[in-house]
Image (cartoon, rainbow, N blue to C red):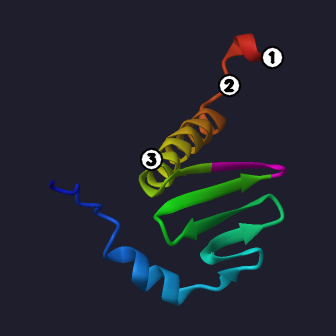
Amino acid sequence: MAHRHDPNASLLPRVLRGFERAPTEPSRVVLAADAHGRVELCACGTAHLSLGAVTFKVPLQAIVQLHALLGDALQRLDRADRAPASPDDN
C-alpha cells in the first residue's frame, strides 16, 4: 500500500528543533504568540491556531492559506481607506 507524501514531513524536524516548546504540550512548538493569540505546530504536522478561548486544529497548509486570505483583506481595506471620499460620504 502506497503512502501519500506529506510535503511538510521534511520541514517538521527542522522547525521543531528551532522553536521553543509549548508550555502545556511538549510535542508542539510555538511559532508565534502575542496577547491576542498563538500559533503552535505539532510534531504530527497539525497547526493549532488559538484566538482567545478558541483553538482551531488545522493542517499547516490552512495557516498558509489563511495568511494569504487575511493579506488580501488587509490590502482591500488599505485601498478603501486611501480612496478619495465621494460627496455622498459626507
- Tell me the CA gap for discs 2 and 1: 8 Å
Q: Which residues are the magenta region?
A: 52-56
The residue type indicated by label 2 comes to Ala
The residue type indicated by label 3 comes to Gln
Left or right side of 70 for 62: left
Predominant SS along the magenta part: strand
- The residue that mark 1 highlights is 90
User: Which residue shows up at 61% across the image and 74% down it?
Assistant: 28
- The residue that mark 3 highlights is 65
Q: Is residue 16 above or below residue 8?
A: below
Residue farthest to the front? 1
Q: Is residue 14 above or below residue 37?
A: below
- The residue that mark 2 highlights is 85
User: Which residue shows up at 41% across the image and 85% down it?
Assistant: 14
Residue 47 percent across, percent down from the top left = 55, 59
Left or right side of 16 for 14: left
The residue type indicated by label 1 comes to Asn
Q: Quadrant of the N terminus?
A: bottom left
